[in-house]
Every structure is written in C-alpha cells, then in structure tokens.
Image: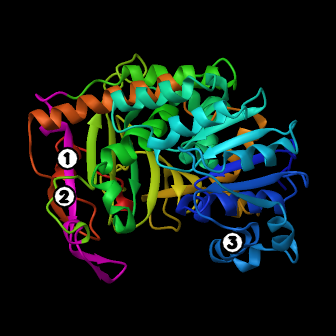
Amino acid sequence: MATIIPVASFDCVVFGATGDLTTRKLLPALFYRFQDGQIPGTSRIIGASRSELTVEAFRERARDALKRFVPAQDMKPGVLDAFLEHLDYVAVDGSGEEGWTDLVAKLAERPDQVRPFYLATSPDLYGAICRNLAAHGLIGERSRVVLEKPIGKDLKSARAINDAVGEVFPEEQIFRIDHYLGKETVQNLLALRFANTIFDRLWTADVIDHVQITVAETVGVEARAGYYDTSGALRDMLQNHILQLLCLTAMESPLNLDANSVRDEKLKVLRALKPITAQDVQQVTVRGQYAAGAVDGQPVGGYLAELGHESRTETFVACKVEVQSWRWAGVPFYLRTGKRMPNKLSEIVVQFRAAPFSIFPSDAFGREPNRLVIRLQPQEGMKLEVMTKDPGPGGMRLRPTNLDISFEETFKQRYPDAYERLLMDVVRGNATLFMRRDEVEVAWAWADSLLKAWGDRPEAPRPYPSGSWGPTSAIALIERDGRTWHEEIR
C-alpha cells in the first residue's frame, strides 16, 4: 500500500475557478487527495473568478464536475459532501480592482495557513494577478504561486511573464507546472536510471542506438481552436512536455534529489541541444496538419474545417535532435507529437544497439535489438523487450518477449493523477518536479531557433488523414537513417 503523508493545512486560491482546467483536473485531484486523508480538515479551496456566484452555486458546479470526472466507484460514501464543505468562493477580477477586499477578508480569517495561488487563467493575466496579490498584502513567506503552461509563446514573451511574476514572488515561491513531470512513470525514470546499476552502465552512446519520444492525441483542437491556431504543436507540446521528457532521459545524475540539483542537470541538457537552422530544417523536421479521416472508426473533419479559415499552423511535428555531450554523441533523439492520431499515447523508447555478432542460424530470428519502452499513458508502466527461445522442441528459434511492469497492476492500487502529486508538492514547497525560470527560457531559445528556421524556409504543413500517424515524410525522417518508429505505435 502507498504511504499517505498529510500535508500542512492550507488555503488554496484558484483563479479561473469556473474554467475547464479547474473543472477537469484541479477539483478531481484535490478531491482524491482529500478522500485519501492527505488534505487536513482545516484546509480550504477558494475559487476566484469574475463570475457572480454564491458559495452554494460554486459548490453545486463542483459537485457536477466531480460526478462527471471522478468514477462513481472511486467515491466513498459521504466523502463528496464533506469535500464540498471545504470549498469557498469569491467573485474577483484578477486583473482589475473588484472583489479584492472580499478575498483579503476571507484569507485574513486564517493568516498562518500555507497559501498557494493557482493561476488557472490566460498567461496574459499572470502579471496583473500577482501585482494585485502584492498590492493587497496577500503574499507572505508561506505563499506560493502556480503558473500553468504555456509561459509565453516565444522567448521574449516568456521573459516578460517571468519578469512580471518575479517582481512580486521570489523564484523559490514560483511553481511552473508541467503535469507530465508528475506522472508516476516519469519519476520512475529517475529511479530506473539512478537506483539500478544495470541501467546506469548501459545509458551511453556505446550501447544505445537512438531514443524516440512520442506524445500522440486522438482529439482535434475542438473548443481550443482559437488558442491553438496561435500556438501549434511546437509551442503546445514540443517546447514543454516533450523537451522535459528528453531532459529526464538524457540528464546526468544529480548530486541529490534537491530541486535545484535536479533542475541544474536538466538545464545542461537543454543547453546542449543542437539548434536547428534553415540549412537543415527540411532534413530533420516535418510539420503536418490533420485532414478529414476517421478516429476509432468515427469520421472526423480536418483542422481547417474545425477552424473555419485557412491556416498554416501545424498540428503535428516530428524532428530529429542531437544532444551535444560525451554521453549522447552520435545518438539521435526522434521526437514527435500530433493531434488526431490513431491512439492516445505517450511513451519513451530507448532502442539499444543490435548485437554485433550472432551465434544463431539466420532463420532463428530477425535480429531484433533490445528496447526499453517507458509508457506514460494510457497505462503507466515499463517493459524491456528481450530475445528468448520459442518454447517447444522445434529447435533453437528466438522471438522478442516483454518483461512488463504495469504499475497499477503490479502494486494493486490506483495511482494518483499527476495533478494530485504536484498540488501536494506545491503545499510542501517542493519544487523538484517544476520548471525553473532558466529552464523555461533556454527551452524557448531552442524552440525559437526552430521557428526561425521554419520562417526562413516557409513551407505549408503537410496534410495527413485523421487517424494516421502523421505525414508519410515523418516515416521517411527516421527510415532514411535505417531506423523505424516503434512497431506498436504504427
């Protein structure tokens, strides 16, 4: 059984309390932590938004959200009503003047609480909300502010947001959240690499042929079309989620698990990424945009039909990147992400080099190299693909076999959602799984170089049918190196 360690009592103020993120992710995450006894009964979750709602109306909205996004079998009798009693609400204009007196009065009731401010709003409002928090005396030593991605749309805007928030909060009180870092498998990647000698010794260019990182979604842009068209797959997924996974895969061992030790090593990886220039952008990147097709047997329209006008925004990106370091010299990292893919899937594939010589007859097996597959979703776990003898007396025939670990099945328990873990880390003040300012800005500097290269060599995104794995040129990207995308995701 997992050990549940309660956190300190807190007052969490969620700006954007009536928005989609709060409804789908934050309230369910807090409910689960409350049900497991990790949130003390003296804590409060205070919704804040411009909507004129009573506390009772906000609680009813929360009740509906929890019934929708928390399976009925996961709710213990009586817990929902008890959780709702800890919800409060204040109508406040985060960037204006209205409502702040009411919020000040509510927080003054418990001045010694840990006080996280979760900004589930547009990043354009981060600076204004933080300035208002400071102007009304709501920031103290036990305060934290949580920033959702995207932090900017390029390096310049990211610096502007960081400057605005940094004028009010010291860096150690700023928690830039990337929910991928809260997934159980991502943290187990650290354990796999640095708590097991067998993998630590194999994690080198001498043994590893290449690494693939795939984050695929079956959904289209839907209600996010307006935002997405100004963002695209590079800004929405590659610059943050995928680069963070690359960092944890490629980083050197930190001195310890202190937040800055871990983030120092991730920063070194980002700084070692080779920039993509206009001279090589067409050879090492592919941009795509989904067209009409079918997902899960259901016909769906294309991106332009959903958007309602012409656009050159990419919904798919594949690229080959290099980490310029001793450990990874000559080992390519193939990254891809896209919408309207056949399956919802996030995984890291570490492909080891093939055996240099085989003692087995040529018809015994297809010389499959070993690979380690680290699954982040839909079912978190890891599997190591190794060659074994085919059972039976039919001679020495080999086939790939999986040594498979599904965390939920192995440990016979529900694994917390990433937001559950990260929210509790905010209360504890543990920033290990959050991004530091310099990480964000170095990642944007690399992404900006790719955006500039695309701009210098303008080319429309290549169409791909919904329900496929992207443009055929994405297959060519990896196959001209004599490699192929992981078989299970083709």
> Image point 68% across, 61% down: which residue?
27
User: Looking at the image, which is closer to me, 470 or 435?
Assistant: 435
Q: Which mark is residue 471?
A: 2
User: Looking at the image, which is closer to me, 438 or 129?
Assistant: 129
Q: Earlier in the sequence, mark 1 or mark 3?
A: 3
User: Looking at the image, which is closer to me, 433 or 172?
Assistant: 172
In this rendering, does residue 205 appear at all?
Answer: no
Q: CA distance from mark 1 to mark 2?
A: 8 Å
Residue 285 magenta-highlighted = yes
Instruction: Indicate which label's residue lies in the foreground, 3 or 2.
Output: 3
Left or right for 215, reference 11: left
Q: Are marks 3 and 2 in contact (CB under 8 Å)?
A: no
Which residue lies under the disc numbered 1? Answer: 286
Q: Which mark is residue 66?
A: 3
Which kind of residue does numbered mark 2 sit on? Answer: Pro
Which kind of residue does numbered mark 3 sit on? Answer: Leu
Looking at the rendering, the stretch of residues picked out in magenta corresponds to 277-305
Looking at the rendered structure, the secondary structure element under dot 2 is loop
> Image point 70% across, 23% down: which residue?
258
